[in-house]
Image (tube, rainbow, N blue to C red):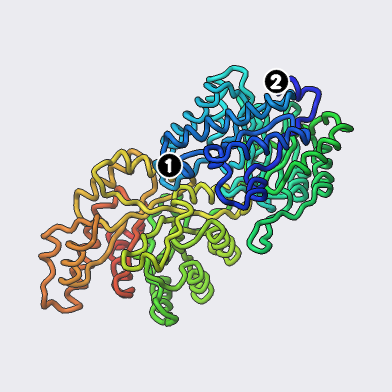
């Protein structure tokens, strides 16, 4: 069956779920994809059930056949080819004209440098399909559209009569796990000439999907695919069940067809019974015309005035900014933190930043402390948002809660890993890395925050032998909406030269780190025990073991001012880290730098 010809006159009915139906039948003794190797008759039987129920397209049992489930590449390839053979034999034995499409799920990898590795794996999967005579592809349950253009283009390149469907998973609010809305996905997919059909599967049931799609319009030539879940997952006596009965499911699917769906079927929780009742419903249906996008609905042509935060307005004006970091308390005593707020406000700090449990040692929550500080002192506060401690649900909730409370400046960081002594007791989450979460925030700004976007920066670790890798990482962050970078403390001329080169090659706004050294002991510690920080012997020599606190502070102010002077033609501002709550020292350093620059900093 040629899908493009069939769809000109018919609504295409696919099969339903493989994974959940397999688990329902066989008590979850293995993953469905593993059964390709160990119990192929089970998979063949499920394919045949769906064909007998009326499916005109079945998907191969390959959704999760990748390195995550099969780390051994040869075993992975064997499982994939076995799944293709099982599907082909099932269709042949049925004696019916049924199309086969390769089911390809997203390949997840948390490392920031993993895109090309993932791409190579996708290519090997698609090559296997074409080599085995499979020319239809369903990329399903994706949450990020960035791969789809590249994947569909590769399919068309390898096979000129390939038919490519892309399907995204959204939650009941209409967003993917990576922050893309239904509205944005439709607009992006409409522009892909290499894509034959697109739509939505998994994530939501038919009722919610209907509500989401009712708000949208579709291009005249769009082929829309809808494969929702059979309601939502419920646990009953240790087994997972889905709530929607076949007739209830069919009712919502009928309404989706009336909205213009061309391809329908089922995802998690659906069974041959759901497909059978859909087949009966389709006997009385014809292909619907699509509602066409009004020309003025393209968001790429729409300009919005975004209200930036005062901090970002000053940074963008070219005026140098002062960012000062205060430590969050380890306990509920906020006396030192409060004092710091008022002192720094009086001395003109542009924004105060609060770290998020550095060194993976629990302190008061940075975002909650930012709200607290803003309320009591009426100052701008920027919490650090670390990927270590929260999953994506928690991260999104944190940003929403901060925004509701007027906190719109954020520093997005990966976060220090859990210490070796705590491993086994404390688990790092790392659902996302800093670049992916910046990209997520970029879409939240487009879809959630409107004219009041969050403004965010990133950390810049300038140290390392491969400057091109540092530049590449900076550019990825900038593409993801990162507005500026805060650096580690700078001390050496070599570090300053490195920052100059990074700025020249990226055009980034860089707020340069200054950390006052407050004693001889402090100088030795930072020189010997702080990785990536380079302190020359000449700096250490300015401190004496027996010098007074006041004399040490004078040296700290002088060194900090000298470093700021060397950075004057590079830095877009200064990021001063407060040592041991000594905010008066930081205030003197800010005053000294302003005096050096005639008050312009």
Q: The residue tagged with tag 2: helix, strand or loop? A: loop
Q: The residue tagged with tag 1: helix, strand or loop? A: loop
Residue at the image point whose x is 48% and y is 32% from the top: 78
Residue at the image point whose x is 48% and y is 48% from the top: 436
State yes or no: discs 1 and 2 in contact (Cβ < 8 Å).
Answer: no
The x, y position of residue 257, in whole percent, is: 81, 37
Residue 450 is at least partly visible in this image: no
Q: Quadrant of the N terminus?
A: top right
Res. 71 mark = 1
Mark 1 or mark 2: which is in front? 1
For disc 1, the neighbor class at 10 Å (few under 14, some 14 to 19, many from 20) is few
The x, y position of residue 458, in whole percent, is: 41, 53
Res. 3 mark = none
Q: Is residue 258 above or below residue 587?
A: above
Q: Quadrant of residue 545?
A: bottom left
Residue at the image point whose x is 53% and y is 59% from the top: 395
The x, y position of residue 136, in whole percent, is: 62, 26
Viewer-closest of 268 and 141: 268
Q: Is residue 67 above or below residue 320?
A: above
Residue 519 is at least partly visible in this image: yes
Q: Quadrant of residue 260?
A: top right
Residue furthest to the right: 284
Judge left or right: residue 149 versus residue 554. right
The residue carrying mark 2 is 2
The x, y position of residue 505, in whole percent, is: 33, 38
Viewer-closest of 29 and 81: 29
Judge left or right: residue 477 versus residue 15. left
Mark 1–mark 2 distance (CA, rounded to whole Å): 35 Å
Q: Quadrant of the C terminus?
A: bottom left
Judge left or right: residue 132 versus residue 572. right
For disc 2, the neighbor class at 10 Å (few under 14, some 14 to 19, many from 20) is few
């Amino acid at each position: 069956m040629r899908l493009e010809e069939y769809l000109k006159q018919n609504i295409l009915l696919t099969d339903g779920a493989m994974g959940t139906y397999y688990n329902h039948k066989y008590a979850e003794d293995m993953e469905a994809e593993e059964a390709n190797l160990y119990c192929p008759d089970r998979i063949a039987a499920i394919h045949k059930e769906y064909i007998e129920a009326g499916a005109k397209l079945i998907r191969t049992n390959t959704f999760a056949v990748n390195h995550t489930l099969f780390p051994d590449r040869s075993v992975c390839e064997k499982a994939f080819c076995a799944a293709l053979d099982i599907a082909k034999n099932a269709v042949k034995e049925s004696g019916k004209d049924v199309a086969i499409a390769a089911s390809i799920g997203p390949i997840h990898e948390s490392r920031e440098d993993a895109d090309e590795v993932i791409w190579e794996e996708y290519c090997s999967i698609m090559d296997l399909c074409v080599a085995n005579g499979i020319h239809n592809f369903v990329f399903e349950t994706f949450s990020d559209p960035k791969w789809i253009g590249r994947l569909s283009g590769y399919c068309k390149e390898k096979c000129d009569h390939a038919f490519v469907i892309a399907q995204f998973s959204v939650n009941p609010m209409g967003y993917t796990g990576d922050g893309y809305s239904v509205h944005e996905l439709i607009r992006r997919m409409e522009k892909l000439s290499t894509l034959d059909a697109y739509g939505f599967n998994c994530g939501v049931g038919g009722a919610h999907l209907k509500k989401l799609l009712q708000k949208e319009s579709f291009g005249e030539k769009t082929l829309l695919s809808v494969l929702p879940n059979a309601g939502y997952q419920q646990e009953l006596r240790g087994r997972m069940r889905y709530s929607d009965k076949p007739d209830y499911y069919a009712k919502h699917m009928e309404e989706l067809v009336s909205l213009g769906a061309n391809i329908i079927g089922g995802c998690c929780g659906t069974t041959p019974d759901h497909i059978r009742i859909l087949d009966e419903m389709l006997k009385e249906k014809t292909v619907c015309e699509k509602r066409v996008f009004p020309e003025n609905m393209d968001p790429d042509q729409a300009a919005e005035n975004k209200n930036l935060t005062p901090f970002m307005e000053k940074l963008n004006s070219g005026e140098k900014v002062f960012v000062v970091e205060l430590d969050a308390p380890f306990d509920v005593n906020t006396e030192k933190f409060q004092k710091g707020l008022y002192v720094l406000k009086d001395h003109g700090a542009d924004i105060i930043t609060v770290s998020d449990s550095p060194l993976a040692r629990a302190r008061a929550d940075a975002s909650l402390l930012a709200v607290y500080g803003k309320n009591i002192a009426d100052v701008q506060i920027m919490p650090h948002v670390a990927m270590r401690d929260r999953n994506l649900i928690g991260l999104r909730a944190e940003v929403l809660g901060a925004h509701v409370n007027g906190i719109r400046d954020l520093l997005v960081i990966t976060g220090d890993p859990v210490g070796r002594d705590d491993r086994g007791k404390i688990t790092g989450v790392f659902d996302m890395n800093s670049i992916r979460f910046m990209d997520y925030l970029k879409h939240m700004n487009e879809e959630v925050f409107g004219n009041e976007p969050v403004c965010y920066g990133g950390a810049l670790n300038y140290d390392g032998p491969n400057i091109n890798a540092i530049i590449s990482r900076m550019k990825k962050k900038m593409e993801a909406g990162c507005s500026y970078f805060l650096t580690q403390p700078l001390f050496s001329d070599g570090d300053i030269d490195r920052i100059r080169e990074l700025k020249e090659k990226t055009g980034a706004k860089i707020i340069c780190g200054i950390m006052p050294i407050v004693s001889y002991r402090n100088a030795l510690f930072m020189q010997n025990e702080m990785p990536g920080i380079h302190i020359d012997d000449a700096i250490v020599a300015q401190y004496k073991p027996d010098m007074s606190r006041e004399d040490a502070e004078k040296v700290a102010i002088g060194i900090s001012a000298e470093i700021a002077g060397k950075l004057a033609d590079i830095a877009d501002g200064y990021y001063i880290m407060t040592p041991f709550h000594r905010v008066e020292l930081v205030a003197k350093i800010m005053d000294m730098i302003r005096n050096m620059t005639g008050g312009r900093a």
